[in-house]
Amino acid sequence: ALLLFACEDEPLQLPDTLHHDGENLTAPILPVGGHQAAARFTPNDQQPYAGRQLTAVSYFLAGVPADCWVIVQGPGTSSSPGDTLYIARVTPEAKTAAWNEHTLTQPIPITGTEDLWISLGLRHTQAMQSIGCDAGPADPNGDWLFSDSDNQWLTFRQRTGSESINWNIRGKVE
């Protein structure tokens, strides 16, 4: 007798990491202009790390845009971040077709009581693939995208009508 067992792919296990994404698959083509790709982490997401600190941000870049920044923002609404807690230009050290990591010069306390948004700001001078993404399905908070063409925070699903992905953006917790 032949027995076959199948199981779903296990979620990516990254201890001490805030993330909604899986392995990098590709990167969508984003148009000319300014963008901010973000992952929102609710108090529920942060509970295992309450009392610790966000010390670094990792992100996958398929291509290095004209300019890019690591941005961490505090609570705003369920569909847009609040005040900027940290921002650093990372263009000079950014590597193409690779995972990049930026160590925060000032760690951010994780309270576990309010939202934390981790994002990558991007400026494109041509349409290109920059920020990486997984194969999905999208986490409700894993695919936020601001565009300066309409000055709106929308999920990538809302912007495309169907693409279900999560940005390859991760927060290292210590």
Image (spheres, rainbow, N blue to C red):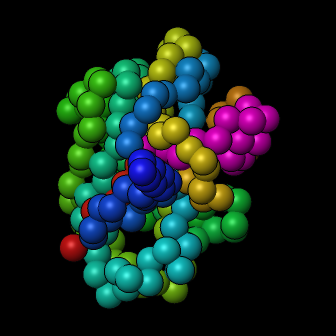
**What percent of the width, then of the height, locates residue 70?**
37, 47
Q: Position of residue 64 (x, y in %)?
A: 35, 23
Question: Image quadrant for the C terminus?
Answer: bottom left
Residue at (76, 42) in percent of width and height: 158
Q: Residue at position x 24%, y 46% from top?
A: 101
Q: Residue 9 in the image: x percent, y percent? A: 45, 52
- Asked if residue 112 lies in the magenta stretch, the reply is no
Q: How many marks?
A: 0
Could you say which quadrant of the image residue 60 lies in? top left
Left or right side of 173 for 140? right
Q: As rendered, which of 168 and 81 lies closer to the eye?
A: 168
- Residue situated in front as seen by the camera: 54 or 91: 54
Q: Is residue 82 left or right of residue 107?
A: right
Query: Taking 44 as reference, is 156 above or below it?
Result: above
Question: Does residue 22 lie above or below 67 as drawn?
Answer: below
Magenta part of the protein: which range? Answer: 153-168
Q: Residue furthest top?
A: 126
View extreme (front): residue: 1
